[in-house]
Amino acid sequence: MKARVHITLKSGVLDPQGRAIAHALEALGFDGVQDVRQGKYIELDIAETDPERARATVEAMCDKLLANTVIENYAVDLAD
Amino acid sequence: MKSAVIVFPGSNRDNDVRLALADATGRDPTMVWHRDATLPEVDLIVVPGGFSYGDYLRCGAIAAHSPVLREVAERARRGVAVLGICNGFQILTEAGLLPGVLLRNANLKFVCREVGLRVETSQSLFTAGYATGQVLRIPVAHHDGNYFADDDTLDRLEERGQIAFRYCNADGVFGSEANPNGSARNIAGVFNETKTVLGLMPHPENAVDGLLGSTDGRGLFAGMVEALS
């Protein structure tokens, strides 16, 4: 089973990289970009086939290692 | 004072801190490779600067979950003094031994220069060699030293005297121009609640030899020797 993890900065946490990307887009002539937030995408291939157990395991991975929950949120998607 | 320095793949200030400790204590610290099964009984554990595990995932994240760090955390819980410098500070926050987190520098640049540092309290085993309010010159060298914690946490740190050092100008005043990385409230170093764990971004181990400029880092090592011997 594949698990897809999106890790994003919590609102209120300054994202200087996102800001630099917004400026670069503006310089390229893309108008109207009001905000850019940069995050991470992690794809996991796991042996577990039960979706509930898989979700619980991947969430534990996020809490323990993949995300720093002081500054980051995460979302887990499962796919066969 | 017996000390140990933890060495990870990618640590690069481990020998600098070894020399500073050897100079201050008259005995070499034990260098502990991250895979070594045993950590000797020591009075001080140092987690040095560098780029452990290539800064993969987040700075310090992989090292924070290595087996040796579990042992360091156990010792810290028993009250053994733990000092994290630069990447070591990042590792200790990732391991949950210190509050907050170190983000990418606000200006996105790697900053490598001497900065002004104000000693916020001399009431700790790490800062006893300084006077409260003393202004030091200590080098920094990092890309991710932008200290962040939510406002409630920052207020609590201030109330409990857990802020060890702040970036300041030559007069000890901290404004944004004296802040090299965008750190919240100019914070350069923090203690845990019992003040037995210290993390700081600047490198006191690189300010111990007059040939290389400032010797203001000596006070930290001398203070620790005094407190822990």
Image: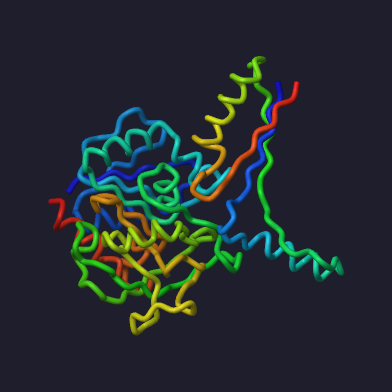
Residue B96 placement (x, y as % from top left): 39, 43
Residue B130 placement (x, y as % from top left): 21, 69
> Does residue B38 sit above or below B186 in this rendering?
above
Pick out the residue farthest to the bottom: B171
The residue lying toward the viewer, choosing from B181 and A9, is A9
Quadrant housing residue B134:
bottom left
Q: Residue at x 42, y 69 (%)?
A: B185
Pick out the residue farthest to the right: A29
- The quarter of the image holding the C terminus of chain A is top right
> Does residue B70 sit above or below A50 in this rendering?
below
The residue lying toward the viewer, choosing from B176 and B16, is B176
> Does residue B113 sit above or below B143 in this rendering?
below
Q: Residue at x 47, y 73 (%)?
A: B179
In the displayed structure image, the side of residue B97 where residue A70 appears, left or right = right
Quadrant housing residue B226:
bottom left
Instruction: For residue B47, say whether it is visible.
Output: yes
Q: Residue at x 46, y 48 (%)?
A: B11
Quadrant housing residue B159:
bottom left
Residue B86 placement (x, y as % from top left): 43, 56
The residue lying toward the viewer, choosing from A65 and B20, is A65
